[in-house]
Image: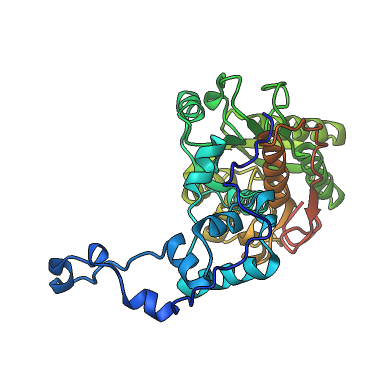
Amino acid sequence: MPATRDSVPSEPSPVEPSPVEPPSAEQLSAEPSPAEQPPVEAALGTWPAPVRRPTGRDVARLAGVSQATVSLVFSGAEAGRRVSEATRERVREAARSLGYRPQAAGRQLRLGRSGMILLAVPNLQGPFFGRVLEGVHEEAGRNGLAVVVSSGWGSATLAEAATAGRFDGLLICSPDDSQLGELPADTPAVFLDADPGTDRARPTVELDVAGGMRAAVEHLAALGHRRIGRLRSSHSAYTFRVRQAAFEQAVSELGLDVVELGVSLNDGHRAARAVAGRLLERADRPRAVLCDDDVVASGVYQAAAELGLRVPEDLSVVGMDNVAVAALLAPPLTTVDLPGEELGRAGAAALAALLRGERVAPVAPLATSLVLRASTAPAGTASAR
């Protein structure tokens, strides 16, 4: 989509203030017109009367310039440079003193855009997606875009959002297979932590989750653990299939025994604790457990404590994501860092480029890394084998 330029009123260059003594900010605040006076009922009620929002006309009066000049200064377009720097600063100072905020609606209407993008995530409560949102917000702000985040969406809901004109573009993060469907061809969209084959006409930003999983398995094997428990996600998403395939390949190459149970990541800590309890109550329980995310790992900690098992003396635990809780657990959790903020920034940058009508080059999978903390120990420690 080609970038468009704002249309602005014609005015001589440079524009200078008219020789009228401007009113003070106090006068403007104290002298609303009769039509702008709040109703008597509101003034006599138990709630404060509404405060009149300053307008561009107020800014123009205070700065001693025309409304057209104020529009040029806040247009964000090249035409704003037709106003001298001294006048621009006077207009901005007047706006600051009045608490004036320019309305974006008119500009967005001229551009045919809402100025908003949608970030669709599987679970708003998932702390990893908070990291992604932080990166999206940061990059979107640099590109003049606002972000709305949503979860619980299906393919039909997403397609409706794409066609209703509410959002300029979509960021679709870690989609479950059931959430994927055909989007309108003219919808700018970028997939995050998703199968690059989902929609080859649209950019995808991946994480090297396979490399992170291999590093975790190799770490436990290097500590001497020959039997590993695995709490894997029960969701049918590409990112979890990649993790599972990498796990199976690594344990096969290293000749390790495995005990696996599935857990719903969307059901949170309580569900993880229950599944972890079943794993650790087994007569042949493993002495090391590898989890698909850090919230599940925190459930393993609690289940272990309830059974009188110590981390890491009796049980080594490794998570995935490296969210804030990982460093706060006692002992701090060894985990695979998935760079959520970087994922969000890269996705938002790609989407902003699409909205400017630019082609987006493929992005290499973002590197992951194993963060070593105190939750793992050699297999010979205490009763570990």
Is 1 in front, or is 82? 82
Q: In this orientation, which residue lies closer to the viewer: 237 or 182?
A: 182
Residue 123 appears anywhere in the view: no
Label total for image:
0
In this rendering, does residue 51 appear at all? yes
Image check: 54 left or right of 144?
A: left
Can you say whether 184 is above or below 133 in the image? above
Q: Position of residue 55 (x, y in %)?
A: 42, 61
User: From this viewpoint, which residue is outermost toward the front?
Assistant: 19
Residue in the image at 67% along x and 66% along y: 331
Please state the horizontal and vertical placement of residue 44, each as a whole percent of the image: 13, 73
Compare residues 287 and 135 and report the one nearer the observer.
Answer: 135
Residue sitting at x 50%, y 29%: 158
Identity of the residue drawn at 48% across and 67% down: 59
Quarter of the image where one finds residue 227? top right
In percent of width and height, residue 354 lies at 69, 33
Tell me the quarter of the picture where residue 201 sits: top right
Residue 41: x, y in percent?
12, 67
Image quadrant containing the N terminus: top right
